[in-house]
Amino acid sequence: MASIFSSVLLALSLLSSSFLSNANAHTKLGFSADLIHRDSPKSPFYNPTETTSQRLRNAVHRSVNRVVHFNGKDASVNAPQTEITAQGGEYLMNISLGTPPLPIMAIADTGSDLIWTQCKPCETCYVQDDPIFDPKASSTYKDVSCSSRQCTALENQASCSTEDNKTCSYTLFYGDKSYTKGNVAADTLTLGSTDNRPVQLKNVVIGCGHNNVGRFTNKGSGIIGLGGGSVSLISQLGDSIDGKFSYCLVPLFSKNDTTSKINFGTNAVVSGNGSVSTPLITKSQATFYYLTLESVSVGSKNIKYPLASDSESGKGNIIIDSGTTLTMFPTKFYSEFEDAVASSINAKRIQDPQYLLSLCYSATAKLKFPVITMHFDGADVKLDSSNAFIQISDNLVCLAFRGDDHLAIYGNLSQMNFLVGYDTVSETVSFKSADCAKM
């Protein structure tokens, strides 16, 4: 990574966020970066002793555990709270923090906002393989004051010391009882770029965690929030990327081990033949990206999807999330959906011994899968069989959906081999079928 950051930096500042001002607000960005799956050989989480099916099984477990990411709230009933599981998320990004830059492999999460990492001095820090960031070693680091807009942007996550009432502090409690506490600060963030011209972003608001306790892993060293809240990377980039980012997720464990890509600004436009768009629904909890799913087709059978009950329009009944592997449906709807899928497959059902997935078949059977189409508001997205079914053991293939009354999430398996574009200005999410390994 050091060689990358020794390249000529594309030095650009954060532009026109809701709480940061910059004289260069007219500059527009367009760049792409690698999005590394946590089970990739390029990831610090990679375990070479695991089989492909074991990695998939673990991803399914993480999907189920990610329910606490949304604090047990159903996306179709109430807006979820900003509680997440420690080290939640399935993808990572190479970033560097400070001047000189300290490399960090950060979990990229569309379900959270704050960018944070462990910092010296540690009151209580979990063991971390990579060096811990030292604010004193960065010439561009500065704590944020209580009276600043950066502090107020964190709302109920921020507080001020009773001792000096000057330095803004933050606290994030996670759904699994883990937490991080520290100073709200601003520093230079450097993003690795696929063209070997790292993008340097000045005055990025971060959390500098001095007290981090819970189920954090030594392999992770930071989180980069890609949600819709005011302190996320997307919001801080603001007008410089015109509110646009996109990603193209390579199918899991592809033979050539190609890395997925995340794009920003002018590189993130999703358009042309085959592209479809659906409205991005804004709710009181700004972190999460809500879509409206009207129905799901299994072959020729169309099943109406329940409306959201927390809005008069019924819109915004499912969250799109890159950090969840499975797609989660409300239990009653899932039951009808599963029955339709099962009736379309002429094979004997086999029970998942771990009871995580409920519709499974022998992997050696000659299976013919039905065509599944997601009918979003204004956008029909036709899934490939690899989007809908996964092989979780040597002899078991299962439907990659699950019923859960706590949430509704459009997961990353359903998004693989699609270029998925978010436009927070036009308030749309676009889909376009793609061979992500070639992008």
Image (cartoon, rainbow, N blue to C red):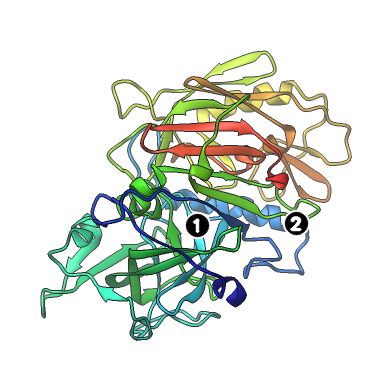
Instruction: In the rendered structure, find residue 383 and report the number of the disc placed on it.
Output: none
Q: Is residue 246 above or below residue 87?
A: above
Closer to the camera in the image, 273 or 314? 273
Residue located at (60% from left, 38% from top) = 419
| Residue 85 spot, x, y in % from top left | 45, 59
Marks 1 and 2 sit apart, C-alpha to C-alpha, by 19 Å
| Residue 397 spot, x, y in % from top left | 77, 41
| Residue 222 spot, x, y in % from top left | 46, 68
Q: SS of the residue at dot 1? A: strand
Where does label 1 land, which residue? 108
Q: Quadrant of residue 122?
A: bottom left
* 180 sits to left or right of 422: left
Mark positioned earlier in the residue sequence (1 or 2): 1
Looking at the picture, which amino acid does disc 2 mark? Asp
Where does label 2 land, which residue? 257
Q: Is residue 307 above or below residue 318?
A: above
Residue located at (25% from left, 60% from top) = 157
* 250 sits to left or right of 28: right
Q: SS of the residue at dot 2? A: loop
Closer to the camera in the image, 80 or 37? 37
Few, some or many residues within 10 Å of mark 2 (<14, 14–19, 20+): some
Q: Quadrant of residue 211?
A: bottom left
Looking at the picture, which amino acid does disc 1 mark? Ala
Residue located at (49% from left, 43% from top) = 266
Few, some or many residues within 10 Å of mark 1 (<14, 14–19, 20+): many
